[in-house]
Image (spheres, rainbow, N blue to C red):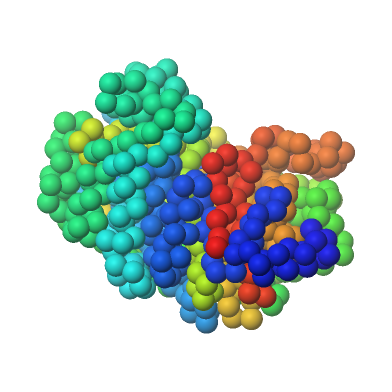
Amino acid sequence: MSIRLFALVLLLCLFLNSITTKAQTYSRNGMVVSTSSVASETGRDILKKGGNAIDAAVATAFALAVTHPSAGNIGGGGFLVYMDNEGTATTFDFREKAPLKATDDMFLDENGDVIENSNHFSAKAIGVPGTVAGLYKAHEKFGKLSWQEVVQPAVELASNGFTMNWSLYQSAQYFEGDKERYPQMQGFFSNENGDIVEPGDIWKQTALGNTLSLIRDKGSDGFYKGVVAKKIEAFMKANNGIITKKDLAKYVAIERKPVFGTYKDYQICSMAPPSSGGVTLISMMDMMEQVSFDTLEFNSTAYVHFLAEAMRRAYANRAKHLGDPDFNPDMPIDFLLDKQLAKEQVATIDMQKATKSDSSKFGQMPEGDNTTHLSVMDKDGNAVSLTYTLEYAYGSGMVDKELGFIFNNEMGDFNPKPGVTTTRGQIGTKPNLIEPEKRMLSSMTPVIVAKDGKPYLVIGSPGGRTIINTVFQTVLNVIEFDMEIDDAIEAMKIHHQWLPDRIMYEELLLSPDTREALKSMGHEMISRTRLGQLMGIIYEDGIFKGASDSSSGEGAAVGY
Ligand code: DON
């Protein structure tokens, strides 16, 4: 956007509370960005009521559990990064964990091979959910409005219904067409007559509304104890699952120290393990800090090559070292975040040709295709960056009709076979093997970047292992290439995850010449329509600028 246009927008903002231009929304009193406009409006209304960023984030997350059930959830888990307007930050880890009865060979057959789909499509694939405990804990510590006030909008959205959209309608058709794999999703999007709710009609989720009412009235205990816990245990027994009431009663969300890095004059704050996101992101930023951008023009062959090589190195370390910190007390986090390591790694990059990833050591697991991120800032400049997930879209596809929420399939994020790592699909390294009560390693990367010690950029994305890289490039686009938030989100992204050894790129955004040049340097090039689905806010000069990725049809940045 030109300076003149920007000045005009600022002027307009003096008269209006919020204005949307292109794909960007401007406001003066706070902003909520999520993949569902209904959920973003819910968060905005909480801000208007005097709620702070945590209140709005909790309300938005519960609303997403109703309006965006492919990833919004109470049956999954995630991470919340909070930074107040003075730059003090903390995080909440509400990642799912393995049930007490889990074992490191639970997804293997008698020959020791991974049973196909068992770690994603079975009740054993379900990790002990963390979302309700995490939202409760964050709200208990920082919330301003009452718990009842922030949960109530979601209760109403579920019980009274909201307007069915085309994206949900598509999901409904998809599940109809695959009754064998998704028996429990049949009827999920239907009205009381058993017909799929048509776009434009009201879709009510009465059972979910009842479960949410219990959470509203009893807090975290409404989910982890009493009738809901009893029903979850009964559901597991009936479906060959292993989660018990004891697992639920023992679940705790954990407040953890964030990981911090610096990039030039900016401070980067993100999630520590059990997410690999923060450490991997910061180590890549550290490598970028070593180069001169005079020689790395945005989207040039040299730029994409350097990005890919930085990613290759950071992801190799991720696979080797990271897991649940409570089970891996000796993870070399300080070593991975040391700028000296970045210097040494950059020194190994040949700018003329691709390095070869050593496939004899580790491989990567395939990822699911849904998760969701929300970014919130309140009028005082406090910020929340929250990413949570069911792992696959609609998780395990398993749902108890009386509880009304979908269970995750997050056990698929553990390394399924001890010691066996292949180039195609599996890692077998120890830090992320299954153990009772362990949290599975994640790639979710909720980030807050501070400038002059105050929240400046709030960003995150779904996308499995691509998350860290799409967030990484969006941060660079804003702070290195001076892009506005919508441009930073939409601009071309690539993904390299060490193994498989290849660059994924956004098909229509990388020129054919650059593609060919990268190929001749030894990179395998794989096209994707889009990478990431970023939700971000920039806050400067008293103005909030928000944007939701255009790949999210229902998404919206809503301010006031
Ligand atoms: O925690 C993780 O890294 C994965 N379970 C996230 C899955 C995901 O993002 C799929 N979404 N597109």
Q: Is residue 66 left or right of residue 147?
A: right
Vertical placement of residue 176 versus 33, above or below: above
The quarter holding residue 260 reads bottom right
Q: Return the residue nearer the eye: 322 or 512.
A: 512
**Residue 528 in view in this figure:** yes
Total labels: the figure holds 0
Q: Is residue 21 left or right of residue 369?
A: right
Residue 164 coordinates in the image, percent (x, y): 44, 33
Q: Return the residue nearer the eye: 216 or 491.
A: 216
Q: Is residue 197 left or right of residue 302?
A: left
Measuring 51% from the left and 76% from the top, which residue is drawn there? Answer: 380
Measuring 31% from the left and 56% from the top, which residue is drawn there? Answer: 151
Residue 144 coordinates in the image, percent (x, y): 35, 72
Measuring 40% from the left and 53% from the top, which residue is drawn there? Answer: 61
Q: Return the residue nearer the eye: 375 or 541.
A: 541
Q: Return the residue nearer the eye: 36 or 140.
A: 36
**Residue 244 in view in this figure:** no
Residue 514 coordinates in the image, percent (x, y): 84, 42
Q: Is residue 17 left or right of residue 96?
A: right
